[in-house]
Amino acid sequence: MISANIKIIVYGGKSGWIGQKIIELLKLNDNIEYHISDCRLENRESILTELDKIKPTSVINCAGVTGRPNVDWCEDN
């Protein structure tokens, strides 16, 4: 049984394929409160403000970068 106190925030769930699939799974469980972030991950202050406001128990990051140089960008950021 899943605790009703689970609160998840999902980054990258609005337009990404993986994020959308995770949101579909979260919708199946009424015991999980979830939020889909509107924040840009480049904006650290907005992320921190959102985390402080929502106070999630878990964060799921589905954000990604497409195109080149994907691997280099991910390693640098």
Image: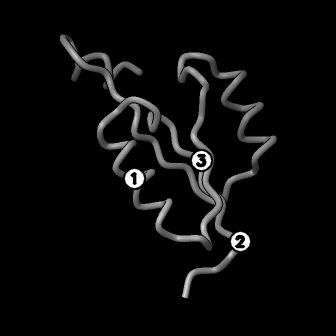
What is the distance, in whole Å, between disc 3 and disc 2 at their CAs? 13 Å
Residue, x 41% and y 21% (percent of image)? Answer: 77
Q: Is mark 2 in CB contact (under 8 Å) with mark 1?
A: no
The secondary element bearing badge 2 is classed as loop
Label 3 sits on residue:
9
Which comes before the other along the chain, label 1 or label 3? 3
Instruction: Give the amino acid at mark 2.
Output: Asn
Residue, x 34% and y 28% (percent of image)? Answer: 64
- Crowding at label 3, few (<14), some or many (≥20) Cα neighbours within 10 Å? many
Foreground of the two, 65 or 35: 35
Residue 70 in the figure: left or right of residue 33? left
In the orientation shown, which residue stands out farthest toward the left? 68
Label 2 sits on residue:
5
> Which percent across, then down, holds residue 10?
52, 44
Q: In this view, does 65 lie above or below 13?
A: above
Q: In this view, does 20 lie above or below 2?
A: above
Residue, x 25% and y 19% (percent of image)? Answer: 66
> Which percent across, then down, holds residue 24?
41, 54
- Crowding at label 1, few (<14), some or many (≥20) Cα neighbours within 10 Å? some
The secondary element bearing badge 3 is classed as strand
Label 1 sits on residue:
22
Instruction: Give the amino acid at mark 1.
Output: Ile
Residue, x 65% and y 60% (percent of image)? Answer: 33
Identify the image quadrant of the N terminus. Answer: bottom right
Colour pattern? one colour
Q: Is residue 20 above or below residue 44?
A: below
In the orientation shown, which residue stands out farthest toward the right? 53
Can you tell which mark lies on residue 10? none
Quarter holding residue 3:
bottom right
Which comes before the other along the chain, label 2 or label 1? 2
Instruction: Give the amino acid at mark 3.
Output: Ile
Quarter holding residue 44:
top right
